Image: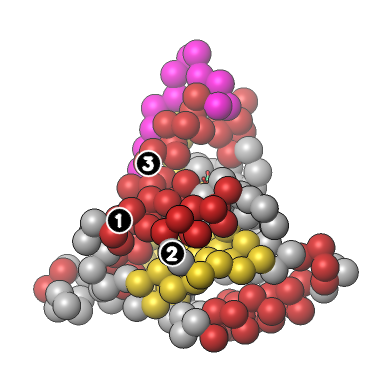
Amino acid sequence: MRLGVLVSGRGSNLAALLSAAGSGRLPRAEIAVVVSNNPGVPALEVAFRAGVASHVVDHRLFGGNRLAHEAAILAILGGAGCEALILAGYRRLLAGPLLEAFPERILNVHPSLLPAFPGLHAPAQAIRAGAKVSGCTVHFVDAGLDSGPIVGQRAVAIEPWDTEQTLSDRILEQEHEALVEAVDWLTCGRLIVEQGRVRIVPRSEGMPPP
Ligand code: GRF
């Protein structure tokens, strides 16, 4: 399955996907193209070093027209033959064209146990709330903010001495694992959405190995 990956910044989740693909952990996934809404970000360098085509579609050049911005991204994804989309640290809500083009085919990774703490600075939100456990969530994307059927989650204990940075760092390690696992499930045809909930079918019911 050819994948497009949308990024906005550092690109550590993209790097985790590329490394998993390179080491055979994603036998049915091919990362076809990377698109960033921000020019000059490290994620573009990550793509370049891996030899993956990358593009910048700067939302600031679209004068607030989110539909036109997404349509431009969609044209690139279509040109690259993408069949699914991974949001790996992509910091924009989807407006419509991408959701319509990839129904139940867009995954996002978020640094909290959703539905708790959606939005920005989720680890800081968890610390402020006095939560003892947080973590990360991989979910299908809908038009809402960090909403959509949950695919996988990993828990991370919050220690009394945690800062936003220390907690984010530990959660990020789990994000990389959870995202790779979810992308494997997706590309092997093992994710089924039933009444808004995701069922992970046994490997034997997914696609046979290539
Ligand atoms: C991750 O914490 C992700 O969950 C959030 O933004 C961060 C992106 O990190 N949406 P990276 O760009 O993948 O390193």
Question: Residue 184: percent from the left, percent from the top?
Answer: 29, 64
Residue at 74% x, 64% y: name it.
Answer: 58
Q: Nearer the viewer, mark 3 or mark 1?
A: 1
- Residue 162 is inside the magenta segment: yes
Q: Secondary structure at mark 1?
A: helix
Task: Tell me the quarter of the picture where residue 100 sits.
Answer: bottom right
The residue identified by callout 3 is 174
Q: Are marks 3 and 1 in contact (CB under 8 Å)?
A: no
Q: Nearer the viewer, mark 2 or mark 3?
A: 2
Q: Are marks 2 and 1 in contact (CB under 8 Å)?
A: no
Marks 2 and 3, how far apart at CA: 25 Å
Point out which mark residue 20 bears.
1
Question: Residue 45: percent from the left, percent from the top?
Answer: 54, 53
Residue at 55% x, 27% y: name it.
Answer: 165
Q: Is residue 39 visible?
A: yes
- What kind of residue is marked 3? Gln
Q: Is residue 22 above or below residue 74?
A: above
Which part of the image, by quadrant, shows the C terminus? bottom left
- What kind of residue is marked 1? Ala
The residue identified by callout 2 is 51
How packed is label 2: few (under 14 Cα within 10 Å), some, or many (20 or more)? few
- Residue 144 is inside the magenta segment: no
Task: Tell me the quarter of the picture where residue 66 sits.
Answer: bottom right
Mark 2 sits near ligand 1, with its Cβ under 8 Å away: no
Marks 2 and 1, how far apart at CA: 15 Å
Residue sitting nearer the eye, 117 or 90: 90
Q: Secondary structure at mark 2?
A: loop
Q: Which residues are magenta?
A: 153-165
Which part of the image, by quadrant, shows the N terminus? bottom left
Q: How many marks?
A: 3
